[in-house]
Amino acid sequence: MGVTKIGTAVRRKEDQRFITGRGQYTDDLDRPGQAHAVFVRSPHAHAHVRGIDAASARAMPGVLAVLTGEDVAADSVGGLICGWMIHSKDGSPMKAGPHPALAQGKVRYVGDHVAVVIAETLIAARDAAEAVLVDYEVLPAAADTAKTQAADAPQVHEVAPRNTVYEWQLGDKAATEAAFARAAHVTKLDLVNNRLVPNPLEPRVAIGEYEPGTEVFTLHTTSQNPHVARLVLAAFIGIAPEHKLRVIAPDVGGGFGSKIFIYAEETVCVWAAKRVGRPVKWTSDRTEAFLCDAHGRDHVTHAELALDERGKILGLKVKTIANLGAYLSTFASSVPTYLYAPLLSGQYDIPAIYCEVDGVYTNTAPVDAYRGAGRPEATFVIERLMEIAARELGVEPVQLRRRNFVKSFPHQTPVIMAYDVGDYNASLARALELIDYTGLAKRKRESARKGLRRGIGFSAYIEACGIAPSQAVGSLGAGVGLWESAEVRVNPTGSVEVLTGSHSHGQGHETTFAQLVSDRLGIPIEQVSIVHGDTDKVQFGMGTYGSRSGAVGMSAIVKAMDKVIAKAKKVAAHVLEASEGDIEFKDGRFSVAGTDRGLAFGEVALQAYIAHKFSGQELEPGLKEGAFYDPTNFTFPAGMHVCELEIDPDTGIATIDKWVAVDDFGNVINPMIVEGQVHGGIAQGVGQALFEGAVYDSAGQLVTASFMDYRMPRAADLPSFTVDMTVTPCPSNPLGIKGCGEAGAIAAPPAVINALTDALGHENIEMPATPQAIWRACRNTPAQLAAE
Amino acid sequence: MYAFDYHRPTTARQAAGLLGKDEDVRLLAGGQSLLPMMKLRLVQAGDLVDLNAVDELRGIARSPRSLTIGAMTRHAEVADSPDVAEAIPALAAMASTIGDPAVRAMGTLGGSIANNDPAADYPSACLALGATIVTNKRKIEADDFFKGLFETALEPGELVVKVSFPVPAKAGYAKFRHPASRFALVGVFVAKRSADIRVAVTGAGANGVFRWLEAEEALKARFIVKSLDGLVASTDGLNSDIHADAEYRAHLIAVMAKRAVQQATA
């Protein structure tokens, strides 16, 4: 059992448990005396609730309670919150309507939570839920992002006239207008960034419990950030005092952002557990996940890029309408604003940028962060513009990018971000080599001979990860700081427990974090365990999203380990009867410099706990240290993805033939896990580009409410990826890490659409580019398409 | 799922007896359509008659002129059967594309045609090959069996026992899968038989499987792909939804018909 070094592609420690079915997900847990909750949900997108008749449901066998908005109000259960304040350009705060845990007088989307039935068994709860009679007065619905601000559109919330939550702006309008006035060429683009349903493998689950003796509540739930859930439930919703509420997120089967948020169902389970005096369990079914999990993306955008006669970018202006759904979810307001517009500069040196974003209400499910969160939307805008501009100017897309790349660092963009380091030419050069760019013309001819059309598409993406310096996000309206915490507990036998505020729901933290500890402390990886996801075990932490667990979470662990090593040196100095300054720590061994005298890490740990060689007055016994790490900057992973595909014009099917990804994630702990993250991200990005799309009809009914109509990407849709990396270590954190969790999902959509439009010979195709859409785009001229 | 009474007969006669009992009795074959519907509470069965222990409904028998397949024969058994592969290879190939391995391991011929899902594969094979559906009461020609959306000629108390397929000279099946559900968005089965040529289309029609007579006529002259050049199916009576409007479906019918003929003549 040797040391596992940073940079080793060691197999994931947690996979044995997951692959053999021994994971413990929330739904695997059952609590003594547990009852089951089933929600009565609105079948209408918009309606007044005139009355709820639950008398017959309450009388059914096994029913313990039927609770409604009246009970929520009677118990003063607070509404769900949005934790990021956005101000409009006129300085007014965003207009957030109420979001009660159970509807009070009105429902605003199909699936809105009207009542909950709690019964002895799931079947009894289901039967009774069907017997709850709700008297709805159906109202017209505002379901269309582009039309919801019309004067005659149905009003979703009284507080938000014209369904407008905010009219936000970023950048210098005057400077941008001046740049456009000087432009030799302006490229214009209208686009829709399609709406997505997150669909993690494991749906959401909650078990609420209340122990009357100690007055302690416990919530087992599928959360990416259990401490934040506890904070919100305690401080804002008022379910329980923070010190009397324990939130546990055990094994969690994927989140992609959708499990960051604090939803009505989890809230109700905790609250109802005290009401009925029984643990209350709710497991979402797939239909509920489609209807009620916070969706992603859903932008309508107009963008213009100004260039000079040499193809150098002068300015960029963007106007986006961002659908936020029927209620503001936990971080909804920040996604199309501060997670979006600051990335519009892409990898390019753009002197002037101006972006306006209207956040709007509609009678659809809430929209919030989904893998990439704002950054895929920004990348799609700039990378589509670059491709189109190059085609319009008759320049090679690669050449136009090269001409405009940021080449010296640090680089301050006009939209907040200060890029610290990168080498965009290097990733482009490597990608061209790997895709065999020089052989492209030949491959296109070969495809044409088979009656197929081949296209190539580039995507030079950048993202801001390692979210985020607390002061910076505080100044932008965040209600929380985005540091991370860690505690390193060394046991007397020398094994180590790391308690982290990060949360793994598929990322492999139990391996990468342990690998870091093994490398730094010089002990076998088997002697390290990673503890996360339980607010009673782990000190306050901020959780996992925004590719932050490596850059922020692991940096906190490094900081705590540095303290452990410093303390252990003091212990070793006493034991070895040397001065502290002479103790060196290397390869898991403390030794006296220039001698062969030394102690293994485990021996020092034991000495720290038995405390026989030093007095408790001069040195505290024990070996356990904690740390909070607050980053000084975002990190800026960037890279080049290239997609090459073939279209069959007879059927409209696009087949991806080659995919090259050259990413710069800074230093990498476990290349196998990083590659896996890239693969999964590309799959989701290809899903957005070619397959996935949540469709609401004009009445606000979700047409794509099951896998029978919502098309997920499949393994067979994807080629074998060619993944490579370039490395410019991140200067702002001790490990030089940038983060890799979202890169693929950010890079992929423009790569696919740029390849498709190359193959088509025109730009008229939206996401998802379904076979039907591609067939039509092959068959009709752009003019015909525009007329349709 | 709502509660129901469960029955597990061992003979077709017992099953038919139970079936005749009440209005809301449902037969359980492979359960690949019925069980999901019951789980979603979209179907409520008072009594569920499970046919999985009725051995006489299973099996594949081959004669020089025909192939007879028991109603409870699984898709995987048809796909893997050397007899089917020799007699009507297009039928084995078609069965191998139904759903996914889990569906093929459980789903049955009888279940598929009795359900008559408008996007199921088997109805097109039955219609194109001119199959005879044998029930516990009578024999029904495929042309008379498929009556529309989830509707068949089966009467109360009647269950499919087996299906007899005449061996064609040539046959082929091509399918364009629904992007999400993977059912046939358009599936075309072509068969050149001793007496005629048949082209049956599934997935596209708002009223279920149908024969594309113009294509049959065009193929009479010569049973080759070229005979279908320029032929476009009518959009009348075709489905239209977010995945494919009628125009796209009509186009795909022609493309899949050509690919089916290509296979049949390869």
Image (cartoon, grey):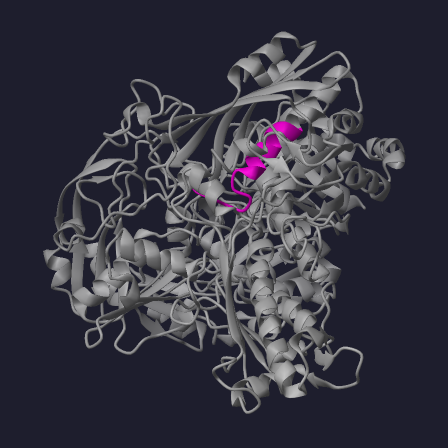
Q: Name the spot of residue A217 as percent of width and height, x first.
A: 27, 68
- The residue lying at 68 percent from left, 48 percent from top is A730
Left or right, B162 with reference to B19: right
Kindly indicate the quadrant of the structure image that contains residue A82: top left
Q: Can residue A108 be found in the magenta stretch?
A: no
Vertical position of residue A702 compared to residue B95: above or below: above
Please give the name of the residue rendered at 54% of the width and 45% of the height, measured from the top-left corner. Answer: A711
The tally of labels here is: 0
Q: Which residues are magenta?
A: A368-383
The residue shown at (18%, 44%) is A104
For this view, does A493 lie left or right of residue A9?
Answer: left
Instruction: Place residue A754 in its image quadrant.
Output: top right
Asked if residue A229 lies left or right of residue A450, the reply is: left
Query: Can residue A422 be seen in the rendering of this structure?
Result: yes
Residue A390 image point, x, y percent = 74, 21
In this rendering, is residue A255 above or below A166? below
